[in-house]
Amino acid sequence: AQSVSQHNHHVILSEAASLELGCNYSYGGTVNLFWYVQYPGQHLQLLLKYFSGDPLVKGIKGFEAEFIKSKFSFNLRKPSVQWSDTAEYFCAVISGGYQKVTFGTGTKLQVIP
Amino acid sequence: NAGVMQNPRHLVRRRGQEARLRCSPMKGHSHVYWYRQLPEEGLKFMVYLQKENIIDESGMPKERFSAEFPKEGPSILRIQQVVRGDSAAYFCASSPPSGEQYFGPGTRLTVT
């Protein structure tokens, strides 16, 4: 069965610092990859997605993620975080042509002004 | 295009009562998913439905919980004889055939 690992459970950064959140998945076949963000008290919103093509994907709010097939990774990055980026971030994977999405356990990001 | 709609947003039930949570997918989406989120925990998959079919219910508790997505109308998550441990946020998501999921605002269930 597919599994998704987010090794950083809680990250604290100062404003303007660079961000990289790790995401690794287990299934070695064709995958569709996603990052979602959940702001405090709100629902999950799609940040970016990868289906095929350019492995460097750009999403909303200055976020990007890079798919590295050989490392089974899809890390999320942002060059300069803002206080408003404080939220929980979830990596998610669809694999094997089956639409069930497997979510990681989430990374809570706290940005200090 | 309206997003995924869920109602009610907040639901309070006494132990032993039934809770019915509704989800209307985005227009054109025929896949619906239900998740439960407990405080300080991640998102737990419960069930995946298409119109009139349950595709995967591997995350549903074996008793008291059921879900449906009829040909007409919203998807319903039904919890019978609620207990305090059922208190959580229940999120619905819908997707087009390509698979990316769009989430509703959730229903926060409180069992007293």
Image (tube, rainbow, N blue to C red):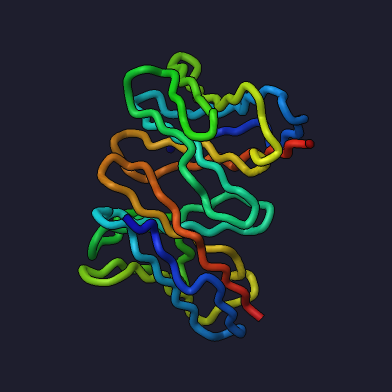
> Can you name the residue that lies furthest to the left here?
B71
- Residue located at (35% from left, 58% from top): B2
Q: Is residue B64 visible?
A: no
Quadrant (top left/top right/bottom left/bottom right) for the N terminus of chain A:
top left
**Residue A105 position (above or below residue A22):** below
Most foreground residue, A93 or A47 = A47
Q: Is residue A63 visible?
A: yes
- Residue located at (45% from left, 61% from top): B60
Residue B70 shown left or right of residue A9 in the figure: left
The picture places residue B81, in percent across and down from the top left corner, at 52, 82
- Residue located at (51% from left, 62% from top): B106
Residue B24 shown left or right of residue A65 in the figure: left
Instruction: Please state the total of marks drawn on the protein image.
Output: 0
Quadrant (top left/top right/bottom left/bottom right) for the C terminus of chain A:
top right
Identify the image quadrant of residue B7: bottom left
**Residue A46 position (above or below residue A8):** below
Identify the image quadrant of residue B15: bottom right
The picture places residue B23, in percent across and down from the top left corner, at 39, 66
**Residue B3 position (above or below residue B68):** above
Residue A9 shown left or right of residue B65 in the figure: right
The picture places residue B102, in percent across and down from the top left corner, at 40, 49
- Residue located at (39% from left, 59% from top): B4
